[in-house]
Image (cartoon, rainbow, N blue to C red):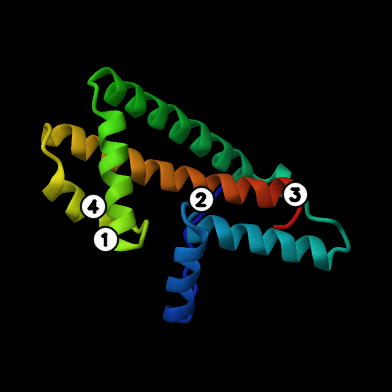
Amino acid sequence: MARKAVTVYLDIAAYQKLRKLIAPKTISRELDDLIKKRIAELEGKEYNPLESADYEELKREYERLLKDTEKMERTLKKRGTYQKLIAVTDEIEEELGTKDLSIVTPTLLDRWNGAKEDAHLFINFLEKLKKMKETERQLDKIRRGMK
């Protein structure tokens, strides 16, 4: 599929909200998908998102995230810090009453008595895991036909 940059004027608030809601998908991919869906609708055809390049990109992204998180988990387990970091994080989440990484992370860094690289690798792990779950939800929607 050939792609070309074009200028489109959009409401900034709507653009920013959509960008957050569709992550990790890009606005360009979303607009491309919406245009293809509308064209199919106008032509009286049924749009199949499984045929879209976006679906393939999501599958690749999911596989990459899965491999990355598995590798990080193995590394932390090999270093003997994975379970300790899980326990500290669970304790912090319970105390703060949230699982929001942006809130939990500073406390985790303050409380962790082990090597800082383990804490940072664990935080990277949690962030990638979050992205993986978002991608998984998007794949679920596509595969269930709820685009």
Q: Which residue is mark 1?
A: 103
Q: Position of residue 127 (x, y in %)?
A: 35, 46
Callout 3 secondary element: loop
Tag 1 and tag 2, C-beta contact below 8 Å:
no
| Foreground disc of the pair 3, 1 | 1
Please report the residue visible at 45 percent of the width from the left and 64 percent of the height from the top: 20
The circle on residue 144 is 3
Q: Which residue is mark 4?
A: 105
Where the N terminus falls, by quadrant? Answer: top right
Q: Position of residue 52 (x, y in %)?
A: 67, 46
Please report the residue visible at 58 percent of the width from the left and 37 percent of the height from the top: 59
Report, in whole angstroms, how far the alpha carbon at label 4 lies from the one at label 3.
34 Å
Callout 4 secondary element: helix
Report, in whole angstroms, how far the alpha carbon at label 3 lies from the one at label 1.
33 Å
The answer, for residue 84, to whether it is visible in the render is: yes
Query: How many other residues sit within 10 Å of disc 3, few (<14), some (14-19) or many (≥20)?
Result: few
Query: How many other residues sit within 10 Å of disc 2, few (<14), some (14-19) or many (≥20)?
Result: some
Callout 1 secondary element: helix
16 w.r.t. 123: above or below:
below
Report, in whole angstroms, how far the alpha carbon at label 4 lies from the one at label 2.
19 Å
Q: Earlier in the sequence, mark 4 or mark 3?
A: 4
Q: Position of residue 68 (x, y in %)?
A: 39, 30
Q: Which residue is mark 2?
A: 134
Foreground of the two, 85 or 6: 85
Tag 4 and tag 1, C-beta contact below 8 Å:
yes
Amino acid carrying label 1: it is Ile
